[in-house]
Image (tube, rainbow, N blue to C red):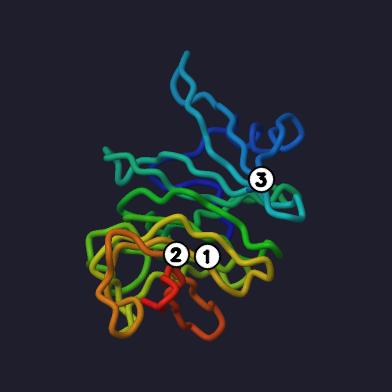
Amino acid sequence: RPLDTVPTDPLPPELFQAVAAAPELVSLSRWRRFAFKVPRLPGKLRAVAAVIDPTGSTVAFTYRTLLGATGPTRDQIYVRDLATETTRLVSRTGQTPGNDSSVGPLFSPNGARLAFTSGASNLVTGDGNGFRDVFVYDLDADAVGLVSVDVHGTTPDGQSLNPRFTPDGSKLAFVSNAGGLVAGFLGRSSDLYLRDLEAERTELVSLDPAGT
């Protein structure tokens, strides 16, 4: 479902022009990330964080938009197909934008998935933990799924962030201070986890030599 606007806050045409031009004008970081600036108000610019997929055909970017007619504003994630010049809002439920900010988009190695972190509670059903969580957007299915789930398949009791795909894109590593992501582990200040996206199984990676 291509979305060229958010109903309450149309995206400026200059944004799309910058998205199309930026990959040719800037050098890319290790994670294929870059940033550019677009007009937001007369005489003012705002930075837009973006990332290019491995094929160079799609750009994901974060842009701050209004929630409702009068605000507040929250960062939302979009994907722009450079060939078809269509844009989708990723951080949404149906046509409703996420009710809190979503940041840090990162493509999988084959470009089929997009990982990000969000504090929004309306991207999936039952997200009531009040913390930032890690999500994955499937570009072909046009669907958002929660990655940082506990052993019961629900949102955990802490925050999760910094997702990174494995080289084959089948798993996603992330950092969390939540408990219950794996059986029998209550969590610490910060631990590294690995989520198998196909088997829907999470393992604790940050173990000492004794396995604890």
Q: Secondary structure at mark 1?
A: strand
Badge 2 amino acid: Phe
Q: Visible in this render: residue 146?
A: no
Kind of element beneath mark 3: loop
Name the residue rendered at 32%, 85% in the picture.
Answer: 183
**Which mark is in front, 1 or 2?**
2
Residue highlighted by disc 3: 30
Q: How many residues crowd around disc 2 within 10 Å: few (fewer than 14), some, or many (20 or more)?
A: many
Residue under circle 1?
Answer: 137
State which mark lies toward you, 3 or 1.
3
Decide if residue 126 is on the left or right side of residue 97. Answer: left
Most foreground residue, 211 or 203? 211
| Residue 129 visible (yes or no) | yes
Of residues 70 and 53, the one drawn nearer to the viewer in this rendering:
53
Which amino acid lies under the numbered mark 1 shown in the image of this protein? Tyr
Please, what secondary structure does the residue beneath circle 2 have?
strand
Q: Which is closer to the viewer, label 3 or label 2?
A: 3
Q: Are circles 1 and 2 on residues that touch, CB within 8 Å?
A: yes
- Could you tell me how far apart the alpha carbons at marks 3 and 2 are, in whole angstroms? 21 Å
First reached walking from the N terminus: tag 3 or tag 1:
3
165, above or below 56, in the image = below
Q: CA distance from mark 1 to mark 2?
A: 7 Å
Q: Judge the density around disc 3: few (<14), some (14-19), many (≥20) Cα neighbours within 10 Å.
A: few
What is the x, y in percent for residue 55? 77, 55
Residue wearing tag 2: 135
Residue at 50% in and 54% down: 89
Judge the density around disc 1: few (<14), some (14-19), many (≥20) Cα neighbours within 10 Å.
Answer: many
Q: Is residue 202 above or below residue 61?
A: below
Whole-percent x, y for residue 2 in the image: 58, 57
Instruction: Report the amino acid beneath label 3.
Output: Arg
- Residue at coordinates 61% horizontally, 57% vertically from top-left? 107
User: Residue 128 at x, y = what percent?
Assistant: 23, 67
